[in-house]
Amino acid sequence: MPRTLGGFIEDALHNGYSRVNEEISSFSAPVNIQETDNSYEMQLAAPGLKKEDFKISVDQNMLHISYEHKEENKEQQDSNKWLRSEFKQKSFKRSFTLNEKIDTGKISAKYTDGLLHVTIAKKEVSAPLVHEISVN
């Protein structure tokens, strides 16, 4: 079930790490979201990853954050024989619904110390115009 959180509706996914099989692991990175006067500050825990493998996009009113990394692990006895070869993949995807208070053109991100920091700027939402209509 989706939850409302500081102007967002979080698309609830499984939390924590889950093993899909021996070669592929998938997890949902835990997220902290803090509201400030001018923005929402998101911290997504993703230790040991590379910033180049993150993909962040906005599609209409949805913010998508994903990560995919494939690596090859080879163990060799000598240079001619393979004793073992494993392909591993790490991935996750989180999606958030944005409301009309978000300036989608002013979303920024940086990755430091195992945390993906996403700043989601707020924009001024004008109050709806109120007109009185007289009944004749």
Image (cartoon, rainbow, N blue to C red):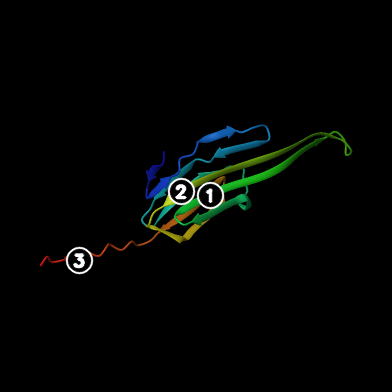
Kindly state the secondary structure of the residue where label 3 is placed: loop
* Image-based side of 86 in relation to 96, left or right: right
Q: Earlier in the sequence, mark 1 or mark 2?
A: 1
Quarter of the figure that contains the N terminus: top left
Work out how far the residue at label 1 is from the one at label 2, CA to CA, in angstroms.
9 Å
Q: Earlier in the sequence, mark 3 or mark 1?
A: 1
Q: Amino acid at mark 2?
A: Phe
Kindly state the secondary structure of the residue where label 2 is placed: strand
Neighbourhood count class around disc 1 (C-alpha, 10 Å): few under 14, some 14–19, many 20 upward: some
Which numbered dot is residue 65? 1
* Image-based side of 53 in relation to 77, left or right: left
Report which residue position mark 2 lands on.
96
Neighbourhood count class around disc 2 (C-alpha, 10 Å): few under 14, some 14–19, many 20 upward: some
Q: Amino acid at mark 1?
A: Ile
- Identify the residue shown where x is 25% and y is 65%: 129
Which numbered dot is residue 102? none
